[in-house]
Amino acid sequence: MNTLRIFILIISIFSSSFAHAKAGFLSFGGEQIIEVIDLPNDERFQTPEGEYVNIGYIYKSVAVLFIPIWNYDGRLVGTTGQEDTYLNLPQDQISIMLIESENEFPQMPLLDFWHRIGGKMIFLIAIGFIGFNIRKKMKKKASFLSPLPTARERLKDILINSQEFTELEPSVLNIEEKDDVPGLEFIAFKNYFNSFVSVSLIDMNKVTIEQVKANNDDLFERLLPLKKAVSSSAQASLHYIYFTFDKSPSNDDITVLKGLKKKKIRNSTNVIPAIIDFETMKVDTALGAMPSKKILENCFIQAQVEELHIEKVKI
C-alpha cells in the first residue's frame, strides 16, 4: 500500500466532517459542497470503508430567501459521494493527489454564475425596487399630509411630490406674435409608460368661459410641441386641462368646458378636462385622467383637516 493511500486512510478516520446548510428567510454559515474533479477509482484514492475519493469544493454562504448574496471560506476537500460529508485534506496533499491522478489544479472560479454573481444581482435589484417603492410611498404620504394651508397649494404639491410631475413656467407656451394663454397659472409634465403627460391648470376666476372656449384650440396647438421642448423621448403625448374654481361653477359652465374635449390632435390625445371646485371641494373628471380623482380629492381632505386644526388652536 503506497504512502498516498495510507495518508488518505489516516485522514478519513480522524477528519471526516459534515456540511450542513441552514434554510429559511436568512441562512448563513451553512457549508455547501460541489464536486470539482473525478479521481480514478483505484486503491490510491480509497477510504478504509472502500469509498473512492474525489476532489470537491466546500464553501460557506449567506443567503436571503435562498438567494446567495455572499460566499466565504472556500477550499478544496476530499469527497466520497455521500451527501453533506467530506474529508478535510490539507491543500498540499490535494496537490499531490492531483499530480498522482494526472489532473491539473482546478482554475477559479469554481462556482457557477448564479452563486457567484447572479444571486447578488437579483438581491440588489430586489432591494433597490423595495427601497424605491418605500421612498415613493413616503413622498406621497408627505404630500397628502402636507401642512400647506390651502387646497390650491396642496393640489400643486400633490402633483409635484406624489405624482412626480415637473413644474414648468407658463411662459414655455409663449409663441412669437401671440399673447399669453389666458388664465393659465400652472403647467407640468412627466413621462408615464412611454407617454408624455402634460397637466395644465386654468384659473376660472381670472377668465370667462367664453375666453377659454375661444382660446382652446390655440392652447392645444401650443401644447403639442411641448414634448420636444423638454427633450422627452415618449412616443405619444396626452394632455389634461384642469379648470380650477374658488366659486362653484354652474352646470351650464361645466357643460361648456366638458364640450372642449378633443379626441385626437395629430398624434396626441386628451380626455375630458377636470373641473376642480374649491368651494364645494369636489372633483369632476373623466375615468383614466392623470392623476386620478381620488388623488386630486386629497387636497380637499387634508386642507379640511388643517382648517379644523387651525380653528381649534384659535379657540
Image (cartoon, rainbow, N blue to C red):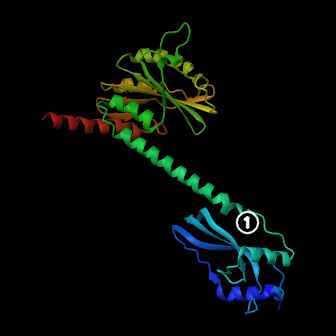
On the image, the x and y values in percent for residue 290 come to: 48, 36
Q: Residue type at mark 1: give it.
A: Leu
Q: Residue furthest top?
A: 177
On the image, the x and y values in percent for residue 184 come to: 44, 19
Q: Is residue 213 visible?
A: yes
The local secondary structure at tag 1 comes to loop
Q: Residue furthest left?
A: 315
Q: Is residue 38 visible?
A: no
Q: Residue furthest right?
A: 102
Quarter of the picture holding the C terminus: top left
- Who's the residue at 43% across and 39% down the image? 162
* Image quadrant in which you'd find residue 40: bottom right
* Image quadrant in which you'd find residue 206: top left
Tell which of 110 and 202 is nearer to you. Answer: 110
Decide: is 64 above or below 56. Answer: above
Left-right relation of 44 to 238: right
Tell which of 161 and 71 is nearer to you. Answer: 71
Tell which of 285 and 305 is nearer to you. Answer: 305
On the image, the x and y values in percent for residue 84 come to: 64, 80
Decide: is 206 above or below 165. Answer: above
Residue for badge 1: 110
Quarter of the picture holding the N terminus: bottom right
Decide: is 168 above or below 313. Answer: above
Left-right relation of 113 to 25: right
Q: Residues within 10 Å of mark 1 (few under 14, many from 20)?
A: some
Tell which of 4 and 200 is nearer to you. Answer: 4
